[in-house]
Amino acid sequence: MNDRSGLRLIILGVLVFSLPITLLGRLWYMQALAGSQYVAAVNADATSVVRTLAPRGAIVDDVGNPLARNDSALVVSALSTALPKANLGTLKNPIANPARVQEMQRLSAVLGIPADQLDAEATLCDYFDYGAAAPTKNKGCWTGSPLQPIPLVTIDNTTPAGTQKATQVALRVLEQQELYPGVTAQIEEVRNYPAPDNASAAQLIGHVGKISQADIDSAKNATDAATLKTAASIGGIVGQEGLEAEYNDYLEGTLGTETFSVTPAGNPVSTLSQVPAVPGDTVVTSIDARVQRIAEQAIADAVTSARTTPQFISGKNQTQKADAAAAVVIDTRTGHVIAAANYPSYDPGVWDGGAIDQKVYQSLQDNPGKPLFSQAIQGQYAPGSTFKVVTTAAALDHGGYTPDATYDCPATLSEGGRTFHNFDNEGAQGMITFAQALTISCDTFFDGVGAALWNADGQLAGANAKELVVNEAKQWQLGKDTGIDLPIDASGNIEDRQDLKNYDAKNHALWCAEAKTDKDPNQKAIDNSNCLYHIPGLYQIGEAVNVAIGQGTTTASPLQMADIYAALGNGGTLYSPRIAKAIVGPDGKLVQTINAPSTKLQVSPEVLQYIQQALVGVVTDPAGTGASAFAGFPFDQYTVAGKTGTAEVPPKDDTAWFASYGGPAGQPAQYAVVVAISQGGQGGITAAPAVRQIYDGIWGLNGNPKNPDDQFAAHGPALPGGAPPSALPKVAQVVGGSAAASAAPASPGVGSTSPSSFNSPTASSPTASSRAPAAGSPAPEATAVRPRRRLPKRKRVKRR
Amino acid sequence: MIGDWAAPRPRRMSSSNAGMLARDSRLRRSDWVLTAAVLSLSLIGVLLVAAATRPLNPTHPFAVVEHQVLFLAVALGLGVAATLADYRAIRSSAPVIYVLACLGLLATFAIGSSVAGAKAWISIGGGLEIQPSEFAKLAVIVLVAMLFSSAREDRRDIGDLDVLRALLLLGFPMLLVLLQNDLGTMLVMVAIVFGLLAIGGVPTRWMIGLTVALFASTVVIVKLHLLSPYQVNRITAYLHPNSPSVLKDSGFNAHQAQLAIGSGGLTGSGLFHGAQINSGAVYAAHTDFIFATAGEELGFLGSALIIVLLSVILWRGLRIASRAPDLFGRIVAGGVVCWLAFETFENIGMNLGIMPVTGIPLQFVSYGGSSLFASMLAVGLLQNVHIQTQATQNSSGGL
């Protein structure tokens, strides 16, 4: 052989042996020198943490009927990593994967959702293969973890139709997995509002929704924000209104943590550690579903009656518009809310665990009666004559008036150049006591008191004015939030000279400016007047007279009036009302008892007793404004005391009020019941019968002349024994660790997915005759809602 | 150098006429160090395939390794056949082997199936597939050895025409491999061709020219984006192993392989006890990334042993090349050494993160019939040349 070949063989030999030597060097470095770094990296790399949602706690009424609970639903979800790849081409030239396209079309046929929508929802937001088409292709994409199954649709499993559909879908998706790779169907928990006894209470319970960025931004602290963010990434929900929002911290429970070892594709191999989710606490409320239902029915009947039965007002016999109404029932001994009814209301079930239908939501928003708005808590109306108890207390305790003396009740009263008429131009009643004035509700009597106090305060100048009536009202917490345990509240309005002065200073320039631009002549006149009259020309005698009879700028919510009448009934304890009675842990143990804080009415015992007697007269004295409504009422068994109110709020029809308290005869009051009906006409005609209907229901009384066949009264007392249950209901233990965010997607059909298990027994609403939840009914079970459609953005702010 | 390679050897006929007894003695004259190294590697391979595939199928944990044992038995038979084959017959059948290999490559375009982006496989039923390009490497080696040794027998030196003819003939199967998208095999073939030309005694200006041409074409390929995205991803992954897009694709697997190897330490986790391997963190842990299995479960001691055994094979191959009785034998042995050296370096290198990821197996160790068959045939060729050397020595010495 020639030398060239031999030499080259030697060179080749050197080159060839350099290769394994290089490998050995690298191997030594990796395994001997840097081995510990790789071990550390392995431990960090090969695991993946998946958070699991906690079952949300239930909200139950005073006997344990669930107002909000979790029901099972079939959730069809997709695992992005197990679906056929979307793009078979390159970024520049994408080629849709026919396997994926066909699977989405099949799925679309089964679920009834457009294939494009399914495809986008099943796509990770950071999936980069779409290239330029990403903005459209990724619309509605999944922001969560690739390890998390992406919920595509939730099928209610509680109705027969829902169960049938769920079974069909599950059969097709699970039995033909080869046609639906990466798609699973699982039974999961969704939030449900079963409306026991057909009681809506929608405005109290509130609802849940998908966690929004606004929810995360408004979290109390960084830890909460981080938790919300994590929960949001796995389809978590948050309370967005009512009790669901107020007690969200208790209801939401604690997220679970599962640590998996995973393959590079993200498929879990085995569970390394598991900290189960801790189910949320149950909120036990003082709401009684039956009383709530009775109250809702009572105001609905009252509205119907006002709209159909003409009332003789201002010389005309006419029906009323009656556009909204509220009823509040409070336990006078604890300050807890037993019922807070709204008219119009709606079925809280429409929230559907946060997946409310957009059309339904829009119709709720567009409804002129504002069913989403709580008239009972947020509604602010002129309290009218129900306010006269405040004027009475102020006059008797501080104004130099005496209970036994009589004062004039003329047909008209002229003061400071103005003439004030009695209600509905009733004639003069002569000289009467405060008690008689309350009983027959003489306006000119209290007009006179207001005018006299105004004069005593120095008229317009008002130097060193005592402002007895307004200060009394403020001491009774009018003009302030009630502090109720809801995200909503209302303060109402009560004004004296200084308040008006402050108000004027703040707005005077605006009124003057608007007076020039106003198109509406009425508004222009008002703004002109506001611009012209300056302090001290503001607090005219008319203001003082109006305040004395609960009109003018004075407003209060039905809840505020219920608080006041509860205080009158219980001897002077004014509560900041509470809806929740207790928080019960998932183990059934009491976490916290919730008591209503209270203040004392600064009313002398004699005057309080005097007012109480006068209020009894309203319903028992034949001349009393509430007597006709309570005709035939068994006053030998039960005492009811109250006050009608007919607030004139032109140009609208009058607001009808009846504020009351009642209890067993000879004992302190047990309940305060207040009904207010916007544009309902006269309190004695429209509101008082509704209040009686509520008492009849609570105590199981027949004989309401307006409604002798009262369906609730016929079923016996709503609150047996005449009092709300003092003991907490037994709250079913919550089954924890429901794999709401199951992270074993590699094996489809994990858990209860055999079609037969879809027909699991569901809770039938306890009927009116059974007081406690039926045994075995899944009261507060597990949760984990996967709301599908994004809810419209809603603020969680206190509303006034 | 031993003997005169150009001289005719009339005694070959008589030795092959000796029948079965002679065949037996031929086997006995094979290179036993080489045989021992190859057998050791193959057995380690069987164990590693078992370790890497057991977790994949809990119901039939050793289904894959049973296949591998079967492949190994067939491969050993092929190796023995190549060892015993007539030296001259191999040389004279080189054109036939070449044509068959090219036909096999062409067949992949008609009836081929695709694995990881490369359409390089032909299904032969029973779930088995063969990769014609593995055998094309052998064909290329034998063909060039035949061409150049014939040229040297006719004239004094290898001329430009010989080189051009060889390049044309080599270019065809390489083009087919390139069209299969099988970049790994293509690179191995380039390495083989360089080795063959160098040992064949091609003029130095050709060697320099071809090196320059190779660099130039690489630049052109990169600049004109002639590679498909998955190839670019794989090749460039090792340059930036932690970028998210790379981690999502092939670089992620190389990363996992390195984690497995690095966590193996000096002694490893023990066979069947690799956490990374058992969790399925490393794809293709029984084929292209089997060295990661060795790294994690056998540690430095076990994986270094694999490299040492491969080095022993290379050493014996070079020794056989240097002692070859003629240019044909030298080119064949040298070509096989180049093939083995580059392919094993590329494979282990990609496992260790110092070479780009291309889809080529670790010879003798990785699961797979085609690679094992072709590798054993190559070892058989080395043995054949070795025996031919012995025979020449013996006959020269005996006379």
Image (cartoon, helix red, strand yellow):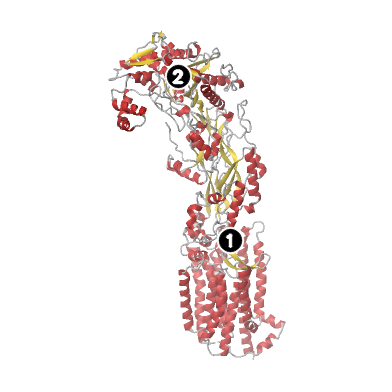
Q: Is residue A427 left or right of residue A628?
A: left
The mark found on residue A355 in the picture is none
Residue B320 visible in the displayed image: no
Measuring 63% from the left and 59% from the top, which residue is drawn there? B54
Q: Amino acid at mark 1?
A: Gly
Residue A501 image position (x, y, % from top left): 30, 26
Residue A54 image position (x, y, % from top left): 54, 41
Q: Are marks 1 and 2 in contact (CB under 8 Å)?
A: no
- Is A291 above or below relative to B337? above
Measuring 45% from the left and 28% from the top, which residue is drawn there? A379
The answer to which image quadrant residue A468 occupies is top left
Which element carries disc 1, helix, strand or loop?
loop
Q: Nearer the viewer, residue B361 or B179?
A: B179
Residue B132 image position (x, y, % from top left): 61, 72
- The residue wearing badge 2 is A645
Badge 2: chain ID: A
Circle count: 2
Look at the image and tell me in which quarter the C terminus of chain A lies: top left
Residue A270 visible in the displayed image: yes
Q: Is residue A120 left or right of residue B15?
A: left
The mark found on residue B270 in the picture is 1
Q: Amino acid at mark 2?
A: Gly
Badge 1: chain ID: B
Q: Is residue A736 left or right of residue B22?
A: left
